[in-house]
Amino acid sequence: MDSWGPPYGAPVPPRDPASPVRPYAVTGGRTAPRMQLALEALVSSATSMHQDLSNRPPEQRAISSLCRQVRSVAEVSALLRIPLGVARVVIADMAAEGLVHVHQPQLDAGKPDLGLLERVLSGLRRL
């Protein structure tokens, strides 16, 4: 993977304190995504492994590669070590261009999603 971040499972190199300039540049100054993205929304890559993404920003290449396996928006943010707001903006942009598929959770009139609660509980148990 390029300098944006290490591959999943690789040791994370120490970084300098985060600069607000990089996230601002990545999102073009936008703080809100083009579409609402829940933390638990699932993201999958719509590109093939052989598709040339060299003309894409490193963030988009990293997300496309990472999401060959379905990931939540929160996982993408955590695994790539980018702020959640930045991840949401970039993922929404990629979805608009057809580079990723976003699967939003179905919420029934404000009732908690039992499947989501079970996944959260399972994740907490693994910690």
Image: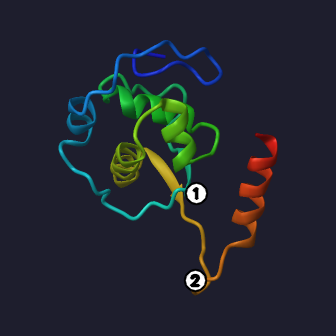
Measured as percent of width and height from the top left, residue 38 is found at 50, 61
Measured as percent of width and height from the top left, residue 19 is found at 26, 27
At horizontal 59% and vertical 67% (from top left) the residue drawn is 105
Query: Can you tell which quarter of the image residue 109 is in?
Result: bottom right
- Along the viewing direction, whichever of 37 and 19 lies nearer the viewer: 19
Report whether residue 32 is seen: yes
- Whether residue 114 is situated above or below residue 127 in the rendered picture: below
- Whether residue 122 is situated above or below residue 23 in the rendered picture: below
Q: On the image, numbered disc 2 is attached to which residue?
A: 110
Task: Sort mark 2 into few (<14), some (14-19) or many (20+) by Cα contacts within 10 Å.
Answer: few
At horizontal 46% and vertical 21% (from top left) the residue drawn is 5
Residue at the bottom extreme of this rendering: 109
At horizontal 42% and vertical 35% (from top left) the residue drawn is 82
Query: Can you tell which quarter of the image residue 61 is in?
Result: top left
Disc 1 is placed on an element classified as loop
What colouring does the structure picture have?
A: rainbow
Left or right for 53, reference 40: left
Q: Are marks 2 and 1 in contact (CB under 8 Å)?
A: no
Measured as percent of width and height from the top left, residue 69 is found at 64, 39
Disc 2 is placed on an element classified as loop
Measured as percent of width and height from the top left, residue 52 is found at 41, 25
Q: On the image, numbered disc 1 is attached to which residue?
A: 40
Left or right for 103, reference 96: right
- Whether residue 40 is situated above or below residue 80 in the rendered picture: below
- Whether residue 102 is situated above or below residue 36 in the rendered picture: above
| Image quadrant in which the C terminus is located | top right
Disc 1 marks a residue whose amino acid type is Glu
Disc 2 marks a residue whose amino acid type is Gly
Whole-number angstrom distance, CA of label 2 to CA of label 1: 15 Å
